[in-house]
Image (cartoon, rainbow, N blue to C red):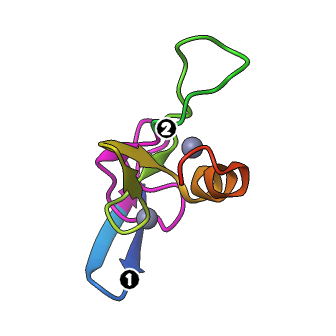
Amino acid sequence: MVCKIVKTDKFTSFVCSRGFGNNTCDTCGAPSSLLCDFELKNSSRKTCDRRICKSCTTRIENKDYCPPHIRFLRSTNDHP
Ligand SMILES: [Zn+2]
Ligand SMILES: [Zn+2]
């Protein structure tokens, strides 16, 4: 098991990795309770599902988006 300390400007947490299935943020490694709700257009009813934490998510209309998809949404202006 690999353990590491993850520090953000809001909190410090201890993250232990036990391989796949861990709920850690894909962006910063903090404990993650959210999944990206971005809908992938080339596969129906599938969402991105990238793991994101509360400090990395951006919530729009009750959906959470990972940083790359927020950049994508802003560049397409689908969600002003
Ligand atoms: Zn994060
Ligand atoms: Zn995403």
Residue 69 location (% of width, % of height): 61, 49
Residue 31 location (% of width, % of height): 32, 59
Instruction: Find the distance from the CA under tag 1 to the CA under tag 2.
Output: 23 Å
Write the residue at 42% across / 36% down: 21
Query: In this image, 51 relative to 70: left or right?
Result: left
User: Is the Cβ of the residue at disc 1 closer than 8 Å to that at disc 2?
Assistant: no
For badge 2, the amino acid type reads: Phe
For badge 1, the amino acid type reads: Thr
Tell whether circle 1 marks a residue whose Cβ is less than 8 angstroms from ligand 1: yes
Q: Quadrant of the C terminus?
A: bottom right
Q: Overall secondary structure of the magenta stretch?
A: loop
Residue 4 location (% of width, % of height): 42, 72
Query: In this image, 78 relative to 20: left or right?
Result: right
The answer to whether residue 30 is magenta is yes
Please rate how many residues cluster around mark 2, counting C-alpha atoms within 10 Å: few if below 14, some from 14 to 19, many from 20. few
Where does the magenta region start and end? Answer: 16-36
**Which is more toward the observer, 14 or 34?**
34
* Residue underneath mark 2: 20
Query: In this image, 34 relative to 50: left or right?
Result: left
Quarter of the rendering containing residue 16: bottom left
Write the residue at 63% across / 57% down: 74
* Residue underneath mark 1: 8
| Label 2: which secondary element | loop
Please tell me whether residue 33 is drawn above or below residue 67 in the rendered image.
Answer: above
Looking at the rendered image, the disc whose residue lies closer to the viewer, 1 or 2, is 1
